[in-house]
Amino acid sequence: MKKSKKVKVIDLFCGIWWITRWFVDEGFNVVAGIDFVESCRFWYEKNNNWAKFIHKDIRKVTWEELTALYNNDCDIKILVWCAPCQPFSWINSNKVDYFFDSEKANTRSPLDKFASLIEKTQPHIVSMENVANLANMEKYPAFKHFLDVLTKNWYETDYKIVDTSTYWIPQKRKRLVLLASKLGKIKLIDPTHKKPITLREAIWHLPKIWIGEIHPDDPYHRTQTMNTINTERIKYIPKNWWNLKWAPDYLIPECHKKASWKTYSSSVYARMKWDEPSPTLTTQCLWIWNGRYWHPEQDRAISLREAAMIQTFPQDYEFVEDTSNYCLQKVVKYIGNAVPVKLWQVIAQSIKIHLNSIS
């Protein structure tokens, strides 16, 4: 990246580090990360001790605060945004979330808030990502309003729905990525892989462990215990197979017996496949009844470390200060709530290329 310009980045909904880390690795100066979850502070600052963590509800952040963070010595201001995606997810597609839909409520949506901050701070470059459903502007008019604000403020905008498995990520997941710039045309870099990244490439090398075991060399390579019936069920799914096709009737979950749930039977109580990308991970990815989260070969659910690596966290990443006594549910929430983190490397690289193309 050209050094003649002073570039500063502010990371909204920064989480425990993943967005800021990739921008830092690509040579950007991230001056602050803002998040409403105080427990993110330790690991955000540990991994980015040159960036300031601000514990604050994004809805209460003012444009004056952002302007002060950029300071007057900033030539190029970049504002990135990665809000919680649950309200726009297919899981919630039949629900109306009044907080997130500004036309159906008096409260303002996070997208409206982001648009307001952009209008008042006028960053040179803006980036956001969320679930693919957000592009449905009939259902989510807040996104159309957001695009209109960018156009009104003279941004060149590019947004698309990407399959993360074509960008260094071993997970089949559709995401909407938007880039906007006042400096000229901007676009996301082309897919880095013609063939999707597979689960085998991501976690094959990790040592074997048993149900409920914690590996002695890695306190995050641990699995949940299972009750007797689930321990029996997993024995009837051959390696690299999908579901309970050969299990005796008493082991078939009731949901699999319903005609209306036929397509669901490969989505829960089912193994992943080595030579395909992982299915989408959630905050429930250590529990086999919540998704296709059985290990492709070993008779157990995936481990915390495997989940983290499928989300493209580095293998040596630590999520808590004290690994001798930590809450597994809390850590899996960090992991499941994260966007596959290398997607932000793609975004950071795209912005870097854009800046380098400007004379």
Image (cartoon, rainbow, N blue to C red):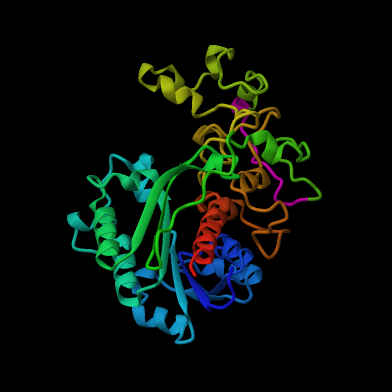
Horizontal and vertical percent position of residue 277 = 58, 34
Say if the magenta span includes residue 221.
yes
User: Splitting the image into 4 quarters, where does residue 147 fall?
Assistant: bottom left
Asked if residue 15 shows in the view, the reply is: no
Q: Is residue 237 above or below residue 293?
A: above
User: Splitting the image into 4 quarters, where does residue 183 fall?
Assistant: bottom left
Can you say which quadrant of the picture contains the N terminus?
Answer: bottom right
How many tags in the picture? 0
For the magenta stretch, what is the residue range?
Answer: 218-230
Say if the magenta span includes residue 156.
no
Q: Residue furthest bottom?
A: 72
Asked if residue 323 shows in the view, the reply is: yes
- The secondary structure that dominates the magenta segment is loop
User: Splitting the image into 4 quarters, where does residue 255 fall?
Assistant: top left
| Residue at point 35%, 57% (across, down) | 157
Horizontal and vertical percent position of residue 134 = 33, 48
Horizontal and vertical percent position of residue 142 = 26, 56
Between 311 and 121, the one lying in front of the other is 121
| Residue at point 43%, 73% (across, down) | 56
Q: Residue furthest right?
A: 216
Q: Is 206 left or right of 148, judged from the image as shown?
A: right
Between 274 and 25, the one lying in front of the other is 25
| Residue at point 31%, 76% (across, down) | 120
Q: In this view, does 322 lie above or below 50?
A: above
Between 335 and 356, the one lying in front of the other is 356
| Residue at point 32%, 60% (across, down) | 111
